[in-house]
Image: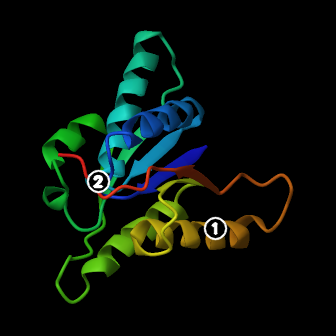
Amino acid sequence: MKFCVTGRRSICVEDIPIITGKMTSVVSRATVVMFGGARGVDYEALKAASNEKLKLIMSGHDQLPKLVLVCPNRLDQVWKSKEQKRMVDEVIELGNPITSSNFYRSFYQRNEYMVDNTDVCVMFWDYQRKGGTYQCGKYASEQHTRKYGNSATRPVGVEVVKLWVSERGLK
């Protein structure tokens, strides 16, 4: 099964074990996991997935997920790009320029690409009905219904993971 990850850029220390625990579960079920490369949830989820994949390699598993970093434009514009590149198997650069006039659109296009190319969107969410995480989850839910209908055998589509609501970000 293919997964993508979306979530807030501003997270608190209490969120990290929540993210790590969920990514342990995702990696054990995934063939592909896509990440958006932002600071906060994207970065912490990628670190957790990379560590979990390493554990699978060390224990001799032959079914390993492919970790993919999806960049709105170019890799060099991703937060901690060199470090993140070392943790993934593939980098996809979408070539959507990030400009002042369409700043958010390039990130929405990245999220839509990830949703369109996966089965399940893992949404680390603080339940605020605004921003990129909310828009990505809403888009994933709509696309999933279009793709699979309301069949009882369809994949979940969106897995929501509740995060601490906090103004404190990671340093």
Residue 85: horizontal and vertical position, in percent? 22, 42
Residue furthest to the right in view is 152
Specify whether 95 is left or right of 26: left
Does residue 151 sit above or below 27 in this rendering? below
Q: Amino acid at mark 1?
A: Ser
Say which of 115 and 89 sits in front. Answer: 115
Say which of 29 and 124 sits in front. Answer: 124
Which numbered marker is on residue 23?
none
Q: Amino acid at mark 2?
A: Gly
Q: Which residue is mark 2?
A: 37
What colouring does the structure picture have? rainbow
Residue furthest to the bottom in view is 101
Residue 116: horizontal and vertical position, in percent? 53, 65
Does residue 145 sit above or below 51 in this rendering? below
Q: Residue at x 35, y 50 (%)?
A: 42
Disc 1 secondary structure class: helix
Q: Is residue 36 visible?
A: yes
The quadrant of the rendering that contains the N terminus is: top right
As measured in the structure, the alpha-carbon distance from the residue carrying label 2 to the one carrying label 1 is 22 Å
Residue 118: horizontal and vertical position, in percent? 55, 55
Other residues around mark 1 within 10 Å, as few (<14) / some (14–19) / many (≥20)? some
Q: Residue 167 lies in what quarter of the image?
A: bottom left
Q: Residue at x 14, y 43 (%)?
A: 82
Does residue 19 sit above or below 73 in this rendering? above
Q: Which residue is mark 1?
A: 141
Q: Are marks 2 and 1 in contact (CB under 8 Å)?
A: no
Q: Earlier in the sequence, mark 2 or mark 1?
A: 2
Residue 126: horizontal and vertical position, in percent? 47, 59
Other residues around mark 2 within 10 Å, as few (<14) / some (14–19) / many (≥20)? many
Q: Is residue 89 visible?
A: no
